[in-house]
Image: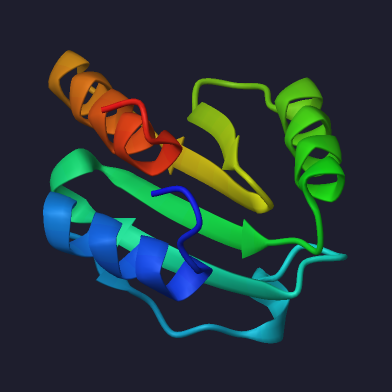
Amino acid sequence: MSGATITEAGADLAEAFGGRVLEQSEADALRGSTESRTLDFPALGARVELHQFADWESAQRHALAIRSTSTGSELVEVTTNGSILMIVRSAAPTDEHRYAIHDLISRFSGDE
């Protein structure tokens, strides 16, 4: 998915994994991001946030901050593809959900 826009990445993931793009609001955006999308994946028990940043360094900085503050029983996976940050959140994932979430992340990262 390298070089894809946030809109293209969101549409591809939604189609491939049975998700849908949710209505956006200013509150959904991370500070410093230029564009954000939130997707819901009911079959995976997960919500995905995609945030576009001006550059790779900004996306990496946000990814590190989110990884260091994630606590509790919620599954939180964070990855980047270029200047796009992906955050996957799942409240109570089953093993099946975890495998599917891994596939979703691999597709986004271009590791499939």
**Residue name at image x 77 percent, y 67 percent:** 33
Q: Quadrant of the C terminus?
A: top left
Q: Residue at x 39, y 61 (%)?
A: 9
Residue 13, image quadrant = bottom left
Residue 30 relative to residue 73: left or right: right
Image height of 59 relative to 99, above or below? below
Q: How is the image coloured?
A: rainbow
In the rendered image, which quarter is residue 72 located in?
A: top right
Residue 88, percent across and down? 46, 41
Whether residue 18 is visible, yes or no, is: no
The image shows residue 21, relative to residue 73, as above or below, that is below
Instruction: Please give the count of numbered marks on the rendered protein.
Output: 0
Q: Position of residue 4 (x, y in %)?
A: 45, 62
At 54% from the left and 46% from the top, the residue drawn is 86
Residue extending furthest toward the front = 3
Vertical relation: 14 (above or below) 83 = below
Which percent across, then down, holds residue 83? 69, 52
Indicate the position of residue 76 as horizontal and vertical percent values: 53, 30
- As rendered, which of 110 and 74 lies closer to the eye? 110
Residue at the location (87% across, 65% down)? 32
Q: Is residue 108 left or right of residue 103?
A: right
Report whether residue 11 is seen.
Answer: yes
Closer to us: 93 or 106: 106
